[in-house]
Image: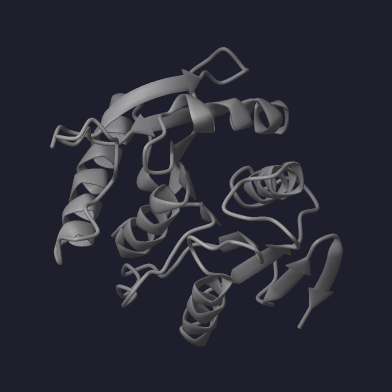
Amino acid sequence: MTDIVEGPALAALSCGKPAFLIVMLHGEGADGQSMVDHALNWAPTMPKAEFLSAEAPLGADGVRRWFDPSDPEGLSKGGAALERFLEAALAKRRLPPSHLALVGFSQGATLALLAGLARSGPAKAIIVFSGGPYGALPPAGADGAPPILLIHGDADEIAPLSAARETKAALTARGARVFSMTRKGLAHAMDDDGVIAAGDFLTEHVVHKKGAAEDDHDHDHDDHDHEAH
């Protein structure tokens, strides 16, 4: 397989050196453009952030995928490749690890969560669209897990909603701040409400918008209903 490479990007609207880097991971068989288009919704509230779509390695069958699910070591290999990519991307922009956030969809979401948890330098946030199943979660880095948002459709037949719920419970038990949003009737896809919620989450946890809520509660979002517990 080829290496992970930088794909389409949306430069910081401030026109200067970016203060934050949001790396997006597409689904299997897709490409970076499918993710960076969503950044057009997020950039206005994050003018100092650069949004970068990574391109997954191209397999021998011509399909881009982050890892081979038939390989028992596929996820670990994918995680190592992503870590090398992230280190290079941060160094290129002269940014510290703490100024990174990860957003992924489907197979890209699975890798974003697992690799993001394992990083020695914690990211600002991780957003997972329709990821899983995840298998055994790695231990969080020395500085703990970043805030995590899980967005999932309850009609997803590719990545079952149960995987997201189990992962949320496991992460919460470890003390991680995990937020979730269940989209009623949504299959394996990203929809407008989920994209808007992701933008709000990035703005709050990456930019630290003045007045943003900072608490240790676990939140469960079911469509538009917000319920804290």
Q: Is residue 99 above or below residue 92?
A: below
Measuring from the top left, give residue 9's x and y in whole percent: 46, 21
Front residue (pair 32, 228): 32
Name the quarter where the C terminus is drawn: bottom right
Q: Is residue 163 above or below residue 89?
A: below
Can residue 225 be seen in the rendering of this structure? yes
17 relative position to 29: left or right: right
Residue 29 picture quarter: top left
Residue 2 picture quarter: top left
- Which residue is pictured at 19% across the width and 45% down the height? 81
Front residue (pair 208, 84): 84
- Which residue is pictured at 51% across the width and 81% down the height? 166
Numbered-mark total: 0
Q: Is residue 165 above or below residue 200?
A: below
Outermost residue on the right side: it is 225
Name the quarter where the N terminus is drawn: top left
Residue 115 picture quarter: bottom left
Measuring from the top left, give residue 20's x and y in whole percent: 50, 35
Measuring from the top left, give residue 84's x and y in whole percent: 20, 42
Measuring from the top left, give residue 66's x and y in whole percent: 28, 46
184 relative position to 179: left or right: right
Q: Is residue 54 above or below residue 135?
A: above
Can residue 122 be seen in the rendering of this structure? no
